[in-house]
């Protein structure tokens, strides 16, 4: 049994879902693991992770619009010192995930046909986001 | 340390929570693992996973009704080509989880007394859903 | 490769976010693991886990108030026999997480600078909550 750790850096340019399934897969292939578990961990409280449909881009636009409706700017928030998009960003992060673990089967991520892995950026300004990958298997 | 992988196929008949705790437990017992970690991964973007109360069935009915209130059909969605229950299904999946990892202690899932593992089907039509189980331990 | 399991008991006094990052870190340091994966699992259906900002306490107050707005008491719930805060507690648990896995890198939790691990208590009365820690690594 062996382990490997890697940090991905993902550049974002405003609120949207950024797919990085391919970056995980490329790193995974270098590790020579047939069966295992890969954990994806987002080191932020205003960006999160989501596995969602990778086919029709309107799904991602609807997801972004939906979360802005249920966690709107200008809500009755105490915490407003870091910009009007900050507290909604924390709420959207709480409603989604900062960690995903995906089984590795036959050397590949065991994702379904329509599943892609996304970083969900909740801030308006450009950011560099760090995502830790941990792999265990053999 | 050893690993095992298994795929469960779960038949659904419309929007509801379908418990499959027993199916996970049965497979687990065959693996002869005393201590470990089992990961449950749903390979879909319109069905999700939830650990919830396994006692009173009204809790599951309330959960289903609640998610239909906060992610209603007929919302202002761009993505509507796959039926009126499709975009709400993606939203409900995003609001819940597609992956759960549960420690294995003394050969059993370390669930609390009132916790059951459910597939949360978000589409109206009957489906066959694939859930990947990954176990590591010894 | 080795494993360890531990159960934390967390006392709560009403609805709020209770940080226990330090308790996880203290146990982790005793295990002498350089690289690994730690899984935190909450054995309840009316309390959940959240990784959130550990700096400004107004973020936690806003999180608590927000979840009470979107999963209010007095909603049209069938399940009301265990008190008016019970069904909202199940909904808030479903909307957040009962399990988190965090990579261990260089002997430490790979959390971001502003990330803390919280138990999110959703019931009004005082409770003792059990959180299972599972660690694998070497």
Image (cartoon, coloured by chain):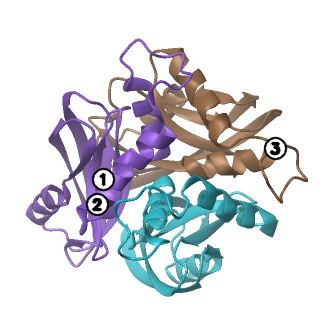
Chain colours: A purple, B cyan, C brown
Task: Farthest residue to the right: give it.
Answer: C81
The residue sitting at 49% across, 16% down in the picture is A79
Residue at mark 3 shares a chain with residue at mark 1: no
Write down the residue under mark 3.
C74
Report if the CB atoms under discs 3 and 1 are less than 8 Å apart: no
For mark 2, name the chain.
A
Residue at mark 1 shares a chain with residue at mark 2: yes
Kind of element beneath mark 1: helix
Whether residue A111 sits left or right of residue C91 in the image: it is left
Q: Is residue C51 above or below residue B122?
A: above
Instruction: Give the number of the disc on residue A61.
Output: 1
Q: Is residue C12 above or below residue A38?
A: above
Write down the residue under mark 2.
A58
Whether residue B132 sits left or right of residue C14 in the image: it is left
Few, some or many C-alpha atoms within 10 Å of disc 3 (few <14, some 14-19, many ≥20)?
few
The residue sitting at 75% across, 60% down in the picture is B114
| Whole-percent x, y for residue C119 in the image | 60, 36
Report if the CB atoms under discs 1 and 2 are less than 8 Å apart: yes
């Amino acid at each position: 049994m062996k382990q490997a750790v890697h940090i991905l850096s993902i550049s974002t340019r405003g609120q949207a879902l950024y797919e990085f399934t391919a970056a995980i897969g490329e790193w995974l292939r270098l590790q020579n693991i047939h069966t295992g578990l890969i954990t994806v961990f987002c080191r932020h409280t205003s960006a999160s992770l989501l596995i969602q449909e990778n086919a029709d881009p309107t799904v991602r636009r609807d997801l972004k619009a939906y979360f802005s409706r249920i966690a709107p700017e200008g809500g009755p928030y105490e915490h407003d010192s870091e910009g009007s998009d900050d507290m909604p960003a924390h709420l959207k992060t709480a409603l989604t995930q900062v960690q995903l673990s995906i089984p590795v089967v036959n050397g590949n991520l065991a994702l379904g046909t329509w599943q892609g892995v996304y970083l969900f950026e909740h801030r308006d300004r450009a950011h560099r986001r760090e995502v830790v990958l941990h792999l265990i298997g053999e």
